[in-house]
Image (spheres, rainbow, N blue to C red):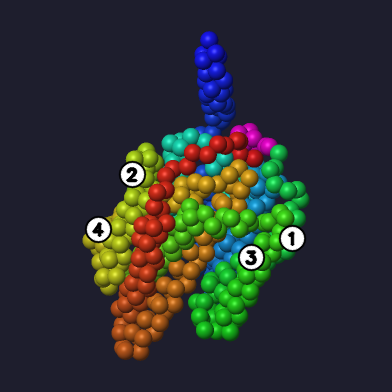
Amino acid sequence: MKTESAREPRTAPARTEAAPSVAVPPDPRRWWVLGVISLAQFVIAIDSSVVNVMGPRLKESIGLSTTGLQWVMNIYVLLFGGLLLLGGRLADVIGRRLVFMGGLVLFTLASLGAGFAESEGALLAARAAQGIGAAALSPASLSILVTVFADRKERAKAFGVWGAVIGIGASVGTILGGAIVNADWRWAFWINVPVGLLIGAAAVALIKAAKPLGERPPKDLAGAVTVTGGLLLLVYAIVTTSEHGWSDWRTLGSFGGSAVLLVLFVAVEKRSAAPLVPLRLFRSRSVVAGSLGEFLTAAMMMPIFFLLPLWMQEVLGYSPLETGLAYLPVSIALMTLAPVASQVIGRTGPRNMYLAGTVAFAGVLALLMGMPVHSGYSEFLLPVTALFGVGLVLCLIPTPIVGTSEATDADAGTTSALLNASTQIGAAFGIAVSVTVLNNRVASATVDGAAADVALVEGLQSGFTVLAVFLVLSVLTGLFGFRGSAAPALPAESGK
């Protein structure tokens, strides 16, 4: 009898430990929430690329200068990339839904203002406000996604949608820009207003508000100032290299100032009781690998979106609409393959899928390095854009899965902001490097007496060749950074 009674205390705890497994049921509205935040990310992605084909009409309509045309894109990227960490931390501190709605309101109003702009200054101010709004909206969206989906398989599907939306938005932005340029460029911005109102109404109905988990208000003012200033200077240095050059004192001074501020930021965070960005995130292999994956994918992706239209319009004579439609295979590949990739990533693992994406990118770069001076669409552009879409699917889906796999409910916004900042900085850096190489090669070929179209093609070939450096680094990131990575299965509460 004593033996049996002695055994009971050992078996009882096993029953009590099993009970909590029935704890938190999944949010029944989670798939609707995914639709809302994906639409928000879609709008942001479109506005990152829609101005690529607007140049001539902006010059005609409001007298935009060549420098002003560059800054229509640069001011958006500068503030978007520079303020992302602050936006992500605010999402953790004051609530994800509040930051999401605040960013959405600012982005929508700025879009309205951009459409009504009658001067260069007004347009640049509106684009600046769009960048600030996006810097709040984007990390808040991803952190809501991280916290709403607790189940590993469901989260993989959700990230599949998220990754596809980024690529589809970039390609649709080019198509939309081309179509609207043929009508009225202002509608490229005005279309965001009804969409923004729809997103806002749906967000209020579907995304739960909850008490913030962090300190309120943020106490790390020194950290906020140093990291925001450091990122702004870093992005400024990168996006202005085509204007000033890499060796210009303004570029070098901006890089140097950025380095000083970011070193000060690390020192401040070590001593802060409530750090803006917990330094432990930078010791997480998943966060570092995911951020590198985002940076390198964007560094290859955006130069292709940015440079290929030069060849289409200036050599092949494509109209803006034809240029946009040429990217249609990218969107088709993303829409058809993303659901499949989301289903199979649980079996393949993020590492294998990401490495398969780098193989597809290798094929794209091999074709672009041998770009002909003249070619029919089916002979060259069709295989390039189709393979490009495949590479985007296989690289964009695994990176957020890896990057957020160790995120907690208290730092989901900050982790999401790190990934988003990596994407924006990678895109700016990739474009800056490839454009610099392109310009140098075009100048050299012109001096050697090459025809204008031949010189441009040689420059494009060189600009795409330099992207091979990012490809090699992507392979190394996949091999060593994604090793042992799996789709996350974190406990989650509702998105704030």
Image position, residue 266 (x, y; %): 64, 65
Relative to the observer, which residue lies in front, 55 or 204?
A: 204
Q: Amino acid at mark 2?
A: Thr
State the CA–CA distance, disc 2 to disc 1: 43 Å
Q: Earlier in the sequence, mark 3 or mark 2?
A: 3
Q: Is residue 224 above or below residue 398?
A: below
Q: Earlier in the sequence, mark 4 or mark 3?
A: 3
Q: Which residues are magenta?
A: 202-210
State the CA–CA distance, disc 3 to disc 2: 37 Å
Considering every residue shown, the one lying at the far left of the view is 379
Residue denoted by label 1: 221
Residue 209 magenta-highlighted: yes
Q: Residues within 10 Å of mark 1 (few under 14, many from 20)?
A: few
State the CA–CA distance, disc 3 to disc 1: 13 Å
Residue denoted by label 2: 348
Q: Earlier in the sequence, mark 1 or mark 4?
A: 1
Q: Are marks 2 and 4 in contact (CB under 8 Å)?
A: no
Q: Are marks 3 and 1 in contact (CB under 8 Å)?
A: no
Image position, residue 231 (x, y; %): 60, 66
Q: Is residue 124 above or below residue 417?
A: below
- Front disc: 1 or 4: 1
